[in-house]
Amino acid sequence: MEKETEVKTDKRRLKSRTKIKEAFISLHKREGYDGVTITSICEEAHISRSTFYAHYDNVTGVLEEILDEALQETGSFWAKHLDLIPEKEEKNCKTPFCVFVRENDRYRNIFIDDAFSSLIVKKLVDRSSDMYYKYISGYTKMTREQLRAVLVFQTSGCLSITKMGIREKMKRWDCVRGCIDEFVKSGIKGIIEKNEKTK
């Protein structure tokens, strides 16, 4: 009996959280971030304020959870630059971030909203920094601080060019993306070559 009550509570909790997140996404798409308030979310989701506060402290908490869920669906945007993903893992690789944002109608407006850029970059850097350091530090004598700066730079650039491509409706996106990938690869190869010369 106790487990059955827990399952019902979990399903109800999940349903409420999903309604809140769906309301956030719909409101943001229609009205932008300024139109997303606790009151508007409650009206859109047909819930009370007390239900909202039972799940989230504020609107930012909803946004963070939406971003975390979306980012779980994306792969690393930098690993291909050094061919770091072993052949066997590549088949299971998730959609690259820039492709995910362009092709995912559900999250696209959130990812291209300039109000969220800093938070998105921080989340992307935080979720990939350990693997980035692990692989890149093997090729260079750069400090962890320097590597973090490069990762932030690369992440910010990836997000910016993705937003630009969407906003300007770039017809030859794959070509532009390929040029940028080659530019980044050449920079990383230069670091590796310089490191090998100093050994």
Image: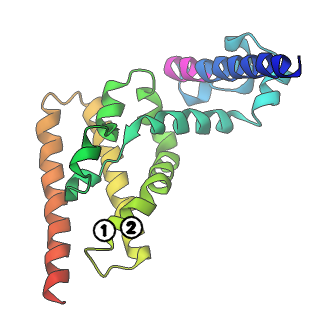
- The residue beneath circle 1 is 136
Extreme-right residue of the structure: 1
- The residue beneath circle 2 is 133
Mark 2 surroundings within 10 Å by alpha-carbon count, few (fewer than 14), some (14 through 19), many (20 or more): some
Q: Amino acid at mark 1?
A: Ile
| 2 and 1 marks in contact (CB < 8 Å) | yes
Above or below, 40 relative to 134 = above
Left or right: 45 as drawn, with respect to 48: left
- The foreground one among 118 and 76 is 76
Q: Main secondary structure of the magenta part?
A: helix
Query: Residue 56, percent across and down?
Result: 75, 33
Above or below, 122 relative to 10 = below
Residue 52 location, quadrant: top right
- The foreground one among 3 and 194 is 3
* Quarter placement of the C terminus: bottom left
Q: Please give the label number shown on residue 58.
A: none
Above or below, 131 relative to 103 = below
Task: Compute the Cα span from label 2 to label 1.
Answer: 5 Å
Query: Residue 14, percent across and down?
Result: 69, 22
Residue 37, magenta (yes or no): no
SS state under label 2: helix
Task: Residue at 20%, 74% (x, y): give it.
Answer: 191
Query: Residue 164, percent across and down?
Result: 28, 38
The magenta stretch is: 24-30
Q: Amino acid at mark 2?
A: Tyr
Residue 193 location, quadrant: bottom left
Residue 28, magenta (yes or no): yes
Left or right: 99 as drawn, with respect to 32: left
Extreme-bottom residue of the structure: 198
- The foreground one among 199 and 126 is 199
